[in-house]
Image (cartoon, rainbow, N blue to C red):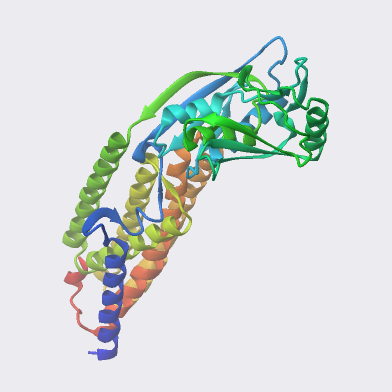
Amino acid sequence: MRWSKVVTLVLIVAAVALAAVITVSPVFENNQYTKKYLPLMKGINLGLDLQGGVHVVVEAKDTPEVKVTKEAMRQLRAVIQNRVDQFHVAEPVIQQQGDRRLIIELAGIKDPENAVNTMVKTAFLEFKDPSGQTVVTGKDLKDALESKDPTSGAVEVNLTFNEEGARKFAQATTANVGRQIEIVLDGITLQSPTVQEPITNGKARITGYQSLEEAHRIAVLLRSGALPVKVEVVEKRTIGPALGADSLAKSQHAGVVGITAILVFMLMYYRLPGLLANFALVIYTIIVLWVFSGFHVTMTLPGIAGFLLSLGIAVDANVIIFERIKEELRGGRSLRAAIDAGFKRGFVAVFDANTTTVLAALVLLFLAPSNVKGFAVTLIIGIGASMFTAITMTRWLLHLVAATNLVKNPRYFGA
């Protein structure tokens, strides 16, 4: 018996066990353990179907003033993207459907109704002189920020004009000292302040808001710019956090049951190689979860399906190789020779099967709708990890066990 190999094997088992504990340790928050596991909940974003949110379809409409064109749709998508970015949503989905529609999916939104209103509001800002002539518009804005007046506590939106806007605003206020400048948003007068003196610093403010949240929503609209065309909401579907949490819990339960069944089968049928394959699958799971966390993958229900499918593919690779090893042992080869020959003969079949699956996943990744892309991403990552664990890790573990001389009887290898 080679004790150095035994010590190496024990150290590997201990290291993997430690990594597994770190990976799925519950987080201690507010004096109690939560169900948020590391890194599954901390580093991996959950999609709309797992944490709730809103799915919206908007359609651009022709008006007498503006017609829907390809350029208008490009601008519409850019403006809505700017508005969505203000919500700080992880991995929002904004994609065009046909010539006039946009599909928008926002996960984890606490106030879906407010988010939808913010996305579809035209937000056309105008400053009008006493004669009703528009002197400055939202296109002349550089920035808009909500704040509270430190003296009065009044909530306001502070505007900063660009160079051209500052020049226009200075001319308008200089010409209308003592008179009112009307501030209009989407045709509704917000206020009509009286100009006390010329304003030449390129700044203005809008007051009269009841809360910072309301002012923030207006500031978001003004920063992102007005919509280039009129839009209407043709579909709105809200998924509550409770429903998302229920879907996640059921997916986790299904995953645990499936993985347990696989581990039991591999152990009962393939014995020692099955035990080592199970150990390699634990390493596979750790690798995949940390890759998901490192790249902040957005996990959806299809993504979970892709992960579980890749786990099955990893097991399939081990099955092919172990059957080859059993054939070699029955043919009279020594244990080490059977392991080498089994991996050599099984590699081609495993590689071909995984390559064709990755090609299919790439087609889904680039051509399929957004709700299928998560399936493709997790499947590709999982196959890459499974190739490493099945071809490299399992083989190395089998050689390591064989070198310890702890097990010599072919029956322990299912032969």
Instruction: State the residue in front, 195 or 27.
Output: 195
Q: Is residue 188 above or below residue 82?
A: above
Q: Residue 166, can we see it?
A: yes
Instruction: State the residue in front, 316 or 98.
Output: 98
How many marks the image carries: the answer is 0
| Direction from residue 375 to residue 244 in the image, left or right | left
- Name which quarter of the figure residue 275 lies in: bottom left
Q: Residue at x 50, y 25 (%)?
A: 117
Instruction: State the residue in front, 143 or 363.
Output: 143
Q: Position of residue 276 (x, y in %)?
A: 26, 68
- Name which quarter of the figure residue 305 lies in: top left
Q: Residue at x 75, y 17 (%)?
A: 130
Q: Position of residue 399 (x, y in %)?
A: 32, 77
| Direction from residue 98 to residue 318 in the image, left or right | left
- Name which quarter of the figure residue 284 lies in: bottom left
Q: Position of residue 141 (x, y in %)?
A: 71, 35
Q: Residue at x 76, y 36 (%)?
A: 199
Q: Residue 415, can we see it?
A: no
Instruction: State the residue in front, 316 or 120.
Output: 120
Q: Position of residue 392 (x, y in %)?
A: 40, 69
Q: Is residue 198 above or below residue 1?
A: above
Q: Quadrant of the N terminus?
A: bottom left
Q: Quadrant of the C terminus?
A: bottom left
Q: Is residue 134 above or below residue 203?
A: above
